[in-house]
């Protein structure tokens, strides 16, 4: 029943986008060549059944801001321009330039995003970066800490960059300026031994990976409050939660601007960002 309803809703959304494709505007040029692909993308953006991270998901709206940023277009998935930009990306990366979003194309996006996280590349090479010396860590002030989780520490250069990022966001995003809770940190530096003990106690270790080697051990990873879906936690990984966060003005600003301050995202967790500008070169790919 739910799948039938999703298919129906996807068709409705697709028809709405298809009507928009005939409208004037920069996102609706190339309509003759890419309108059909835009219609298909509009439907799959809400209704595609897939499992990019193991569990079943429907649609790919949670990943849309990062995809748009990678394609250098603000245009929505139902537009001809989005399809033509996607086709160019596919061709550049050795895929058939169909202009249609699919799981194989997403895996290329995902690979690129992961390669920009030096911590991940260090782990691929078999290294687990050591925590920084305690004298390289600085304390957050109370207004920077989210009430849901008190964390206290970040590497000093990361803390400086974070503060510049927040100041810019408060100046540029009305949503952030109006809500001091937004962009507060609910997890920063986590001592590896304490992290492992907490995971064992709570039974919440993402298998063994987080307990053994988390990016938070470096003092360069921050979990930022970007909003939360009603009834769900600030770090809920449910598809509904992540899609809700991806739609916020706060998250969309981060996607477009966090790189100015040295931060790169983790695609699966809209709240998780890693500082990469001053990474220890011994851990570079």
Image (cartoon, helix red, strand yellow):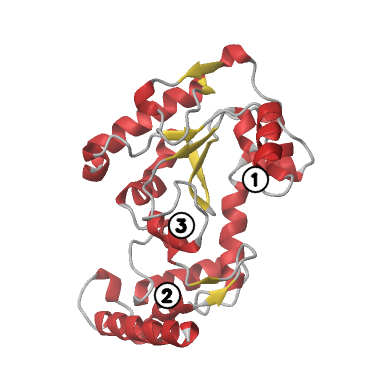
Quadrant of residue 171 within the rendered picture? top left
Tell me if residue 194 comes above or below residue 255 in the rendering. above
Specify which label sits upstream in the sequence, 1 or 2: 2
**Mark carried by residue 204:** 1
| Image-based side of 128 in relation to 5, left or right | right
Distance from disc 1 to disc 3, alpha carbons, whole Å, reads 19 Å
Specify which label sits upstream in the sequence, 1 or 3: 1
Residue picked out by circle 2? 46
**Mark carried by residue 156:** none
| Image-based side of 251 in relation to 99, left or right | left
Instruction: From the viewer's side, name the closer residue of 241 and 123.
Output: 241
Q: Residue at x 53, y 32 (%)?
A: 277
Q: Residue at x 34, y 86 (%)?
A: 32
Name the image quarter holding the C terminus.
top right
| Image-based side of 279 in relation to 27, left or right | right
SS class, disc 1: loop
Quadrant of residue 51 within the rendered picture? bottom right
Question: Looking at the picture, how far across and down is residue 147, in whole percent?
Answer: 40, 33
């Amino acid at each position: 029943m739910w799948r039938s309803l999703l298919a129906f809703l996807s068709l409705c959304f697709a028809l709405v986008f298809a009507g928009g494709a005939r409208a004037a505007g920069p996102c609706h040029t190339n309509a003759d060549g890419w309108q059909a692909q835009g219609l298909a993308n509009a439907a799959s953006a809400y209704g595609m059944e897939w499992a990019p991270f193991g569990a079943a998901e429907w649609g790919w709206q949670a990943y849309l801001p990062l995809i748009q940023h990678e394609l250098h277009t603000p245009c929505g998935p139902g537009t001809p321009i989005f399809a033509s930009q996607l086709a160019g990306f596919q061709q550049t990366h050795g895929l058939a330039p169909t202009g249609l979003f699919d799981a194989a194309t997403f895996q290329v996006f995902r690979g690129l995003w992961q390669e920009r996280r030096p911590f991940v590349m260090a782990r691929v090479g078999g290294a687990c970066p050591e925590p920084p010396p305690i004298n390289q860590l600085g304390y957050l002030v109370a207004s920077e800490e989210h009430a849901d989780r008190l964390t206290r520490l970040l590497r000093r250069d990361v803390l400086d960059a974070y503060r510049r990022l927040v100041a810019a966001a408060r100046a540029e995003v009305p949503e952030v300026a109006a809500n001091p809770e937004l962009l507060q940190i609910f997890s920063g530096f986590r001592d590896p031994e304490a992290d492992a003990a907490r995971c064992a106690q709570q039974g919440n270790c993402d298998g063994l990976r987080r307990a053994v080697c988390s990016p938070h051990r470096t003092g360069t990873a921050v979990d930022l409050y970007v909003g939360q879906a009603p009834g769900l936690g600030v770090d809920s990984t449910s598809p509904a939660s992540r899609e809700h966060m991806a739609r916020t003005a706060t998250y969309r600003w981060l996607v477009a601007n966090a790189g100015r301050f040295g931060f790169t995202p983790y695609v699966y967790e809209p709240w998780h960002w890693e500082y990469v500008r001053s990474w220890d070169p011994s851990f570079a790919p």
